Image (cartoon, rainbow, N blue to C red):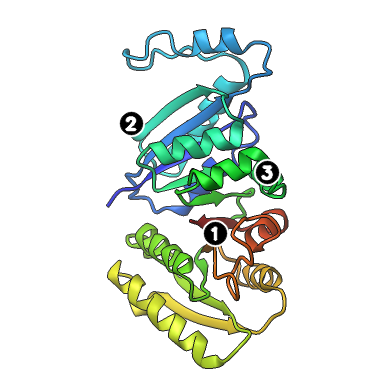
Amino acid sequence: MNKHFLVTISTNADNLCGVRFVGSFFNDRSEHLVTLLHICRLDCDNMSKSLTEMWQNPEEKGACSLTGGLKRSLDKATELLSQGNFSIERTITKTAVERYGKVKDILTEGSQGSYDAIVLGKRASYALQWMFERPAEEVAQAMIRDSCCDVPLWICPEVEPGRKNILLCVDGSDNAYRAVDHVGFILSSEAQHSITLFHVNNSTASESTEIFAKAEEILRDHTIGDERILRRSTWGVSVAGAIQSEGEKGGYAAVALGMHGSREKGLLKDFILAGGTTAKLIGKIEKTALWCCP
């Protein structure tokens, strides 16, 4: 089954980490659909002019007239997707005026469309980290109450050649198993990637075994063969530190984890992202993409 990804882009053609990741991660038979999303900043002096020129007649194929940095960024993005064997005919460009702040606007678009993941470059991920590190902020609280963040977020640094496979972090929570389901769905036709189930154990070895068994059952439902599934567990006080260490050591293309884990022993100690494992990893992981699954 083909997937649909919402990939954010800025006006800086050198800052297309999300596009580069998507273009390099999938195999050469990819027919997935990509929507390139640009949020026009409210404080941009040329915003009105840019919007007028951008979409003069969206009914006509190729009629959008782009200027300046955004045009260069879009041209570069489509070039990168072509190099990654994505079909340009299956690439959509979408722009919107900033309404509630860039982060919430991206998450709102993600929840309203039929997207399988929202793909953020490192600039967008810094904004995400900034917001979730301030849990008292009204916008962040509203996002959580309104369940705007209901689509997996892929936070992508600059792609490092040669990285492959997924480190899938599990803790026994329902949210972690949803992350397993997401990874299985995405990798069902991507035989070039293996999946390492990773559990930071702070109780008994039998707990890891039970968690791994259930996760493997979910992956098999997505036709992931046993030869593609590995197990790894470790003991650690810092879950984020253990994940970061394993991610760097294994040279993984991405680390996947649940956004809201078990309160007592999960990947996130609190319901809000602030101060939890995901927020820490956003700032620390440099070479590996981070897949955060709600």
Q: Which of the pair 206/37 is nearer the observer?
A: 206
Q: Which residue is mark 3?
A: 131
Give percent across and percent down for residue 160: 62, 54
Q: Any mark on residue 259, and which?
A: 1
**287 left or right of 181 in image:** right
> As shown in the figure, which amino acid type bears the numbered disc 3?
Met
Between discs 3 and 1, the one toward the N terminus? 3
**Label 1 secondary element:** loop
Determine the residue positioned at 44% across, 68% down.
174
Eyeballing the image, is 175 above or below 118? Answer: below
Q: Any mark on residue 89, and which?
A: 2
> As shown in the figure, which amino acid type bears the numbered disc 1?
Met
Whole-number angstrom distance, CA of label 2 to CA of label 1? 33 Å
Inspect this view and state whether residue 179 appears. Answer: yes
Between discs 3 and 2, the one toward the N terminus? 2
**Label 3 secondary element:** helix
Give percent across and percent down for residue 136: 70, 46
Eyeballing the image, is 188 above or below 62? Answer: below
Eyeballing the image, is 167 above or below 32? Answer: below
